[in-house]
Structures are given as C-alpha cells and as structure tokens.
Amino acid sequence: MGEMTEAAPEIRQLAARRGLVVERLPDTIDRDSYTPALLGLLNNILLWGGSRVFHRRHGIGTNEWRIVSALGNWPGATAKELCELLGINKSVASKSVKLLLEREDIAQLDGPRGSRHLYLTAQGARVHDDCMPIALDRQRILLESLSPEEVGTLNALLVRMLDSSASMQAYERDIVSDAS
C-alpha cells in the first residue's frame, strides 16, 4: 500500500487545538508485519468481492454462499454445526439460514430433541453448482503467485493456526471477564 496522505497544515493545527493526537504514536502495529491485520485485510477483500459476485449472480452474500457450500458437503447439518464448521456467529447464521429458507434454496427438517437439519433444495444445488466454479477461480487467482508447494505449506500453516483458535478464544474470554 502507498503512503498515506498527510492532512493539510491548517487541518493538523485545528486538530491540535482541539486536543487531538496529530503525531504518530511511538508504539504502533505495522500492518505488513502483523499477521492478524494481514489475514483480516485479505479476509475483507475476499468477503466483499465474493458478496458482490454472488449477490449479482444469485442475490446471496458470502455468508449464504458459505452455508450453501457447507451443506453441499454436509447435508443435514444443523445451524449450530454450521456455526462451528464455518466459524460464524449464531446471529449471522440465523439471518443467512432464514434468507436461504425464504428463497427456498434450503429446507429444514425437524429431528429428535428439537434439532433442525438443513438440506439443499434442487434450486439450492443449482446455486451451489453455479457458484462453485467462481469460488474456485477466485482461489486460483488468489494463489497464482504461489507454487504448488507454497500453497500446500500455506494451507498447512493456516490449519495449524486454526488449531490455535481455542487458545485464542480462551485468552479473549479471560480479558473480557477481567474487564467486567
């Protein structure tokens, strides 16, 4: 990314008169060497681009596509299982499932003990089959500057990082509980 433009001197002076911080702080995070920022930036690019494409093609966003894709692999999954599998918030899953049910891209069947199992409809399977090549092309473009060995290494490292997510969540719970 290029350099940020600096505000005009009169704007900086106005900011300083208002007691705002106008100088760079001594200890900051460098985006290009901070892994969470790099992953977040890449994730945002993928989510926004995917949402634009999938919405234009089928009126669904990335979250709905992820649910359709997951149900292609795991027919009959529950919303709770999808949340765990996809790492999405319950409210996001609920909103996406509701939209997909209304659109009749998925159907819900009641199971034992109040469980609700989700399945793709024939229409949902068509959405899946249309979006799948787009998703794979987006991956190919994203990875085109890497060798097959580097892609394998990257994926292995990302899986290892995902394995650390339970420790990260425990750390975050500790911070949140300390703040209360």
Image (cartoon, rainbow, N blue to C red):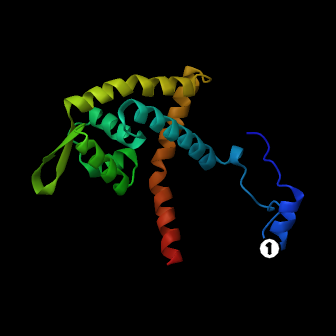
Relative to 114, 79 lies left or right: right
For the point 28% across and 52% down, the residue is 80
Q: Secondary structure at mark 1?
A: loop
Q: Nearer the viewer, residue 35 or 61?
A: 61
**Residue 59 placement (x, y as % from top left):** 37, 37
The quarter in which the N terminus is drawn is top right
**Residue 33 placement (x, y as % from top left):** 70, 45
Vertical position of residue 16 compared to residue 59: above or below: below
Relative to 29, 38 lies left or right: left
Vertical position of residue 159 compared to residue 90: above or below: above
Vertical position of residue 31 compared to residue 70: above or below: below
Q: Label 1 sits on what residue type?
A: Gly
For the point 62% across and 48% down, the residue is 37
Q: Nearer the viewer, residue 134 or 168?
A: 134
Relative to 55, 103 lies left or right: left
For the point 80% across and 73% down, the residue is 19
Residue pointed to by mark 1: 19
Q: Nearer the viewer, residue 57 or 111?
A: 57
Packing grade of label 1 (10 A; few <14, some 14-19, many >=20) is few
**Residue 17 placement (x, y as % from top left):** 84, 72
